Image (spheres, rainbow, N blue to C red):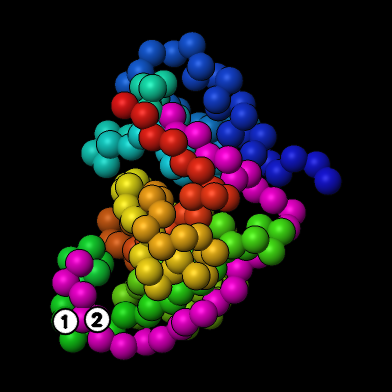
């Protein structure tokens, strides 16, 4: 199996920016798509990964820039042929969380979709993900696509995603699912996915298994 196009573009961008100073601007998605002979969606997926890994960062008002090399986050989990997901919870109801309401920009009476799934690599649990979405901002087809991880990944690649990394103690409710001891330290990733109008369509909390998915954040 050949290397995926988005992965090749990632590798090319890493090579192109390795000698450039921090805070230098990256080419626009349109220019990168032309340069690499790929679709903008594929380029966006590559750039999103590089932002998550710390090679790049976004300024919502100005564009995408090269990050300080010391901020690169080393992630031992690579895209695997054996990657799979299992959905444990999927429901539609009013949100009772102020945090979710604030991030999605909705009111207490607006309905949200909440989904919990576990990420498996070669049948080993590597992360638990919580998804929150405003029902009113998704079509029926997009709601159905939430259950199909490949279609969901393709949909997310079309939008802009910003990430925040939070060192926490593994929540008790997920310790057993991830097969890790209670009180284990872990990195929880918050992902906020916005559309072209700047509206948040997805809020994702990823609880990374510290024994299988190592994320190192340095300053």
Q: Which residue occupies 36% across, 65% down?
A: 171
Residue 83, magenta (yes or no): yes
Q: Work out whether residue 40 can be spotted.
A: no
Please tell me whether residue 14 is drawn above or below residue 33 in the rendered image.
above
Q: Is residue 163 left or right of residue 100?
A: right
Query: Which picture quadrant has residue 95?
Result: bottom left
Q: Position of residue 162 (x, y in %)?
A: 35, 48
Callout 1 crowding tier (Cα within 10 Å): few <14, some 14–19, many ≥20: some
Q: Is residue 210 above or below residue 106?
A: above
- Tell me: 48 left or right of 9: left
The crowding category of the residue bearing disc 2, from other C-alpha atoms within 10 Å (few below 14, some 14 to 19, many at least 20), is many
Quadrant location, the C terminus: top left
Question: Residue at coordinates 71% horizontally, 44% vertically from top-left?
Answer: 4
In the picture, the disc for residue 108 is 1
Q: Position of residue 29 (x, y in %)?
A: 47, 38
User: Which stretch is magenta?
Assistant: 72-99
In front here: 199 or 109?
Answer: 109
Residue 61 in view (yes/no): yes
* Quarter of the view holding residue 13: top right
Q: Position of residue 183 (x, y in %)?
A: 37, 58
**Do the numbered discs 2 and 1 sit on residues whose CB atoms are within 8 Å?**
yes
Residue displayed at 32% across by 52% down: 168
Q: Which residue is mark 2?
A: 95
Identify the secondary structure beneath mark 2. Answer: loop
Q: Is residue 175 magenta?
A: no
Q: Secondary structure at mark 1?
A: loop
| Residue 48 in the figure: left or right of residue 162 | right
Q: What residue lies at 71% left-to-right and 59% top-to-bottom? A: 122
């Amino acid at each position: 199996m050949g290397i995926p196009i988005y992965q090749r573009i990632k590798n090319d961008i890493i090579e192109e920016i390795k000698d450039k100073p921090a805070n230098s601007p990256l080419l626009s998605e349109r220019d990168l798509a032309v340069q690499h002979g790929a679709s903008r969606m594929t380029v966006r997926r590559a750039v999103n990964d590089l932002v998550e890994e710390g090679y790049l960062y976004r300024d919502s008002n100005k564009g995408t820039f090269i990050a300080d090399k010391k901020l690169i986050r080393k992630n031992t989990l690579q895209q695997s042929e054996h990657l799979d997901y299992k959905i444990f919870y999927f429901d539609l109801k009013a949100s009772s969380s102020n945090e979710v309401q604030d991030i999605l920009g909705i009111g207490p009476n607006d309905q949200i979709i909440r989904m919990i799934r576990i990420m498996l690599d070669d049948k080993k649990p590597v992360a638990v993900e919580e998804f929150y979405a405003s029902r009113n901002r998704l079509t029926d087809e997009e709601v159905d696509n939430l259950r199909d991880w490949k279609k969901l990944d393709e949909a997310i690649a079309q939008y802009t995603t910003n990430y925040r990394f939070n060192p926490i103690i593994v929540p008790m409710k997920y310790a057993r699912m991830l097969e890790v001891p209670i009180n284990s330290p872990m990195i929880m990733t918050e992902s906020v996915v916005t559309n072209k109008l700047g509206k948040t369509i997805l809020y994702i909390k990823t609880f990374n298994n510290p024994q299988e998915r190592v994320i190192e954040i340095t300053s």
